[in-house]
Amino acid sequence: MALTQGHEVLCCDRNRRGGLKTIYLVDKDKIDTIVYDAATNKYTSFMTDDLYNFQFDRYTGGFDANATRENGSTVVNVQLNFYIPKVTAKVNKTLNTLSKTCGVIAIVETYADDCVEPTASTYHFVLGYDEVFKFDAYLDFVSAEESTGVALQDANGAQVALAGDAAMFPAELLVGTGGVEITASGGIEDEYTIAAA
């Protein structure tokens, strides 16, 4: 593959807010339709009725994508991290379920936006699927470090990590005009749906 274009850093790119705003998880075998646009590196369709919103403590969610190249092959290790506050039976039930999954795909929304005023859109990325490894790029439960702390003002909760290997850096999911909409079928803990916008 040869270079086909350069990269411009716009003035608004200097405001590059970090962290994740929203995390959705879905079992890898619950995705119905996938449409990828190689020219823009975006998924314009990623249909499912079985998406779940995983809320987390504010400013604790993020993902890393670290690539290494050896023997002509590039592998991108993708890791998703978030902190669930307060140790409860309900939290532990969720962690038990997550720890026994056979691979998940994450749709994550960042705080950074596309700078298009007055209706700037945030970016959504697909973790756990790519155009080379397909569903073999899924994320697995890696760890959950849970602690009540020992002092009154210590943190009380669980740090969760999901990780997987991919062949490409995460592609964007086009949400809104020309892409998809993510909608809740009920309350926060109920299924979400990704459907055509």
Image: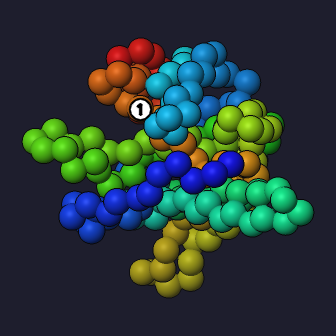
45 sits left or right of 161 in the view: left
Name of the residue lying farthest toward the bottom:
151
**Where residue 51 appears, x then y in whole percent?**
54, 28
Q: Say which quarter of the image contains residue 20.
A: bottom left
74 sits left or right of 122 in the view: right
Please give the name of the residue rendered at 21% of the width and 64% of the height, measured from the top-left corner: 11
- Quadrant of the image containing the C terminus: top left
Q: Is residue 184 above or below residue 93?
A: above
Name the foreground residue: 106 vs 149.
106
**Where residue 3 appears, x then y in whole percent?**
57, 53
Q: The residue under label 1 is which amino acid type?
A: Leu
Q: Is residue 28 above or below residue 49?
A: below
Name of the residue lying farthest toward the left:
118
Name the foreground residue: 116 vs 105.
116
Name the foreground residue: 188 vs 130.
130
63 sits left or right of 7 in the view: right
Please give the name of the residue rendered at 55% of the width and 33% of the height, measured from the top-left corner: 38
Please give the name of the residue rendered at 68% of the width and 31% of the height, measured from the top-left corner: 27
Q: Say which quarter of the image contains residue 77.
A: bottom right
Helix, strand or loop status at disc 1? loop
Q: How is the image coloured?
A: rainbow
Answer yes or no: is residue 186 visible: no
**Where residue 50 appears, x then y in whole percent?**
58, 22
**Where residue 72 appears, x then y in whole percent?**
84, 59
Please give the name of the residue rendered at 26% of the width and 61% of the height, measured from the top-left corner: 10
- Marker count (numbered): 1
Please tell me how crowded label 1 is: few (under 14), some (14-19), or many (20+) other residues with Cα within 10 Å. many
Q: Which residue is mark 1?
A: 174
Answer yes or no: is residue 167 visible: yes
Name the foreground residue: 71 vs 155.
71
